[in-house]
Image (tube, rainbow, N blue to C red):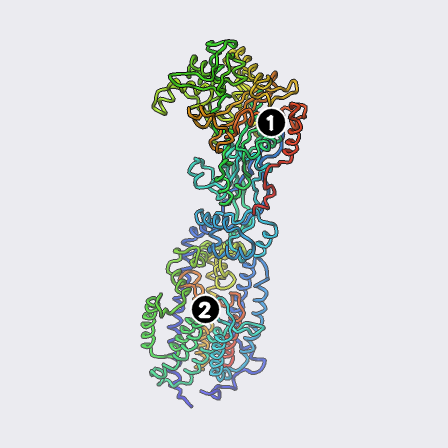
Amino acid sequence: MSYLEYTVKSTPTGIRKIIFLNWPLILLLSSVACVGFLMLYSVAGGSFTPWAEPQMKRFAVGLVLMVAVGMVPIWFWRSMAGFGYGLTIILLIGVDLFGAEGKGAQRWIDLGFMRLQPSELMKITLVMFLASYYDWLPSKKRSRPLWVLIPIVVILFPTALVLKQPDLGTSLLLVMAGGGLMFLAGVHWAYFAAVIASGLGLIVAVFQSRETAWQMLNNYQYRRIDTFLDPSADPLGAGYHITQSKIALGSGGWTGRGFMQGPQSRLNFLPEKHTDFIFTTLAEEFGFIGGISLLTIYLLVVFFCVTSALVNRDRFSSLLILGIALNFFLFFSVNMAMVMGLIPVVGVPLPLVSYGGSAMLVLMIAFGLVQSAHVHRPR
Amino acid sequence: MKRNRADHEANQRLLSRRALILGGVQLSMIGALAARMRHLQVNEADQFRTLAEENRIKFKLIPPVRGEVFDRNGIQLAQNIPTYQIKMVREDARDIDAVIAELSKIIDLDEEALARAVAEMKRSAPFYPVTVADDVSWEDISRVSVNAPALPGVTPEVGLSRVYPLGSDFAHILGYVGPVSDYDLDRIDDPDPLLRIPRFQIGKVGVEAKEENRLRGSAGNKQVEVNAAGREMRELGRREGRAGADIQLTIDSTLQNYLQARLGDESASAVVIDCETGDLVAIGSSPTYDPNLFVSGISVADYALLTENKYRPLASKAVQGTYPPGSTFKMMTAMAALEAEIIGPDDTVRCNGYLEVADRKFHCWKRSGHGSVNLKNSLKRSCDVYYYDLALKVGIEKISAMANIFGLGVRHNIQMSAVARGLTPTKAWKAEVHGRDWVIGDTVNASIGQGDMLASPLQLAVMTARLATGREVTPRLVKSVDGVEQASGAGAPLKVNQDNLKKMRQAMFAVVNDRGGTAFGSRITTEGMRMAGKTGTSQVRNISAAERRSGVVRNADLPWKRRDHALFVDFAPADNPKYAIAVIVEHGGGGSTTAAPIARDITLQALYGGKPPLAAYPSKDRSRINGQQKRLEKVRPTAAVDGKDQA
């Protein structure tokens, strides 16, 4: 389906597009960001520096970017899908070659004004590329092995590059988001059953390879898995994060200890309290009610995206929105599951709340695509 | 590429179906998250709340300030000086070696002390701060503070360090403090939680150890909120402890300094006791050492130097050392005989240079003999045969009993380490310890303070004080505790005939002041200051019959270990005794030549409360004494007072 098939006439034009933006979604995203500002203010001991203020500025830039991306017709973005994917792959390879060393992992390219993490960008361009692929692919070919193999390569190639950095969390998210998109696009369910079965096989292989010459993960990754399986075995070592995180969460109780009153975060018992573990501070200070509230807002964001996708009769738009919503969902659910001790610590930030520049900007651009799809939907 | 509408509709339906399935999966995952959150925050909230409090709140002991020690004139002998320390907490540092490596990049660390600290950290509870570096300069402290983020668990602290300003002069009396050790914990049955603080300083020997309970005080505690790095954020509550009591000793530090200087490098000891009160005015033992070296842990090399020295600087010979009292014991034999009314003071005994008892010849030190001697002459010239004769008549039991009355063979209760009991032998003792019968020769030997008879300089000083006053003078080392005066040692009159004592004192006066007395050369010439005393030379070897025939080898020709001990006891002023003094120079040769001059100098120093006038000395000695006084004035105790040069 080419852009000529859009009923261009009924599409809003010019400044009028602003009215047709998905405003409830913008409101929800802003409220998530506000929770973020509040928590960053709290973990800094009641100060806008060093985290809350830069985060606010970035969110403002992010909002502008989102609206700007949203104003651009969706058919333009669809035409950019292949280019975007290719560029991100080049950037990922570039990270391997020129990337700065950060926390033992080569993850970003320093652009001067910001640090670009191509792996973040990949989450979006992969979804875009796959959406346009399945928009283009005739439904008869969809489940044929060759046409299934192509998207698998498209997913696994960047995943391998990210895994090499090494960034286990993001590579898992890429696989899950890509797989999710293939599922949405209607690839035969038997493929997924086969992948899940072989995935279980892979887990066994990963553990069997430990301490052999062909060991598949780094030692620190194995340790994280060990720690997840039994955090109490090493409460002061690698299990420290999880143990302290659960203490903070649990001690919050129903209503929490009050804004800026959480001893666990205030006294630095919480690790990475302004980034990956920020949810524990929220849960400690605002309790179960606070935690559930944030979860509800996140759920609403996903809900509004899904409804927007389902009413959109453009296949590319639907797939793109659903893919981005899935990404967003994976983001926050993996982070929460991690701090609650449900899954191993993989280093995924809480979207729009955790302190961090490139993740937030990339996410806002993604929601800009959602807006663009929403504004330019066939009517 | 045009697609038909039906195909498009089918695609849309499939997409919606799949989206709903995926949405369902997502919803169930969110349900799982919510359930988990509820489980942690509602069901197990109390448990986690407790854990959070345990994280946050710590009880910390506030160590009390240790009591200080002063001399009788209020001069400080042991004090607490603020020092900067670097402490480290194992559980906060996590990787001890890495943090220490980081720390040693910033400041200089003593390898040996560091190894000790690491061992201690591994041994003690993970949250106890262990001192990594003591006596750190202010510059180093600020350097550590600046680098705090790179040094988890490392905190600079201000602590109090024990310092002995008069150092070596008081080493044997005060002893020293040191970090509590496993050995101490096994030895001391004390539930005081302070002792569980690693490197908490407790008294190891001397007054510091004996008065530990009073000097230590009691711990307070505080409830503090700490952050993850163990840093105290705020105090939640506090209960003050009680500081240790200040202790004033009976020692006069000026006299103590003179005494140590006078003993010099000899292996010698001396005790000065106040006859009226029993106050120990000076207790010296040489060679000595600097107790400050022990406070923060002595180095292996320094310690080896002390233990390998044949003069045994670590031993407090004045109270621990026991020696055959030799002729200084003769007063006891004489008193036993006088009290038993076996002999009168004017009765004479003939000395031919030896006495034959049970087919064995017991020689007098003078081979030609002293002729007829009475009590006064026998003591003055230190005739042995006179006392052999007395002892044979009165028997060992009465002699030992008399010695006990005068404080020999009795452990005096003073606050120093390993105070010796000495030995006054009896028949029962020999049967029990050696399983052999007492023979008459043993009595003969004991009568002149040889054989099994053993006494410490402290005991000899007490004996002399009791002879001088006729009272049961009891030595006292602690004058007051926190300003409360302790019981005096003046004592009740001895249960002996005071007339007999008077005769003894006259005889002792003759020893020093009559021409021909063994200590005449060491007399005091100022009237009203004259001293009375007794020399003693105790053999540490047997002299064979062959050696006696060919002439006894002179002390100077013998190896040090085999030379005689030189002893002297005296009291002064003779007519109104104020001080009693005992001096023993190990393997020093003769009592009259070696010990008596030292005792005389110390006596004069005590009587004048400082440097005595030269007029107090016999005229021919004055120029030599003048030189000696000038030399001794310059001798100061060795003490690393500022603590800097140790590090």
Total numbered labels:
2
Left or right position of A288 against B240? left
Q: Which amino acid lies under the numbered mark 1 shown in the image of this protein? A: Ile
Residue A152: percent from left, percent from top: 38, 79
Q: Say if A195 sits above or below B411 in the image.
A: below
| Residue A122 visible in the current orientation | yes
Q: Are marks 2 and 1 in contact (CB under 8 Å)?
A: no
Front label number (2 vs 1): 1
Q: Which amino acid lies under the numbered mark 2 shown in the image of this protein? A: Phe
Q: Provide the residue designation for mark 2.
A: A331
Residue B581: percent from left, percent from top: 56, 24
Residue B564: percent from left, percent from top: 49, 28
Q: Residue at x 55, y 37 (%)?
A: B66
Q: Give B569 or B548, whichever is nearer the viewer.
A: B548
Helix, strand or loop at mark 1: helix
The crowd level at tag 2 (other Cα within 10 Å; few <14, some 14-19, many 20+) is some
Q: Provide the residue designation for mark 1.
A: B602
Residue B311: percent from left, percent from top: 50, 35
| Residue A311 visible in the current orientation | no
Q: Quadrant of the N terminus of chain A?
A: bottom left
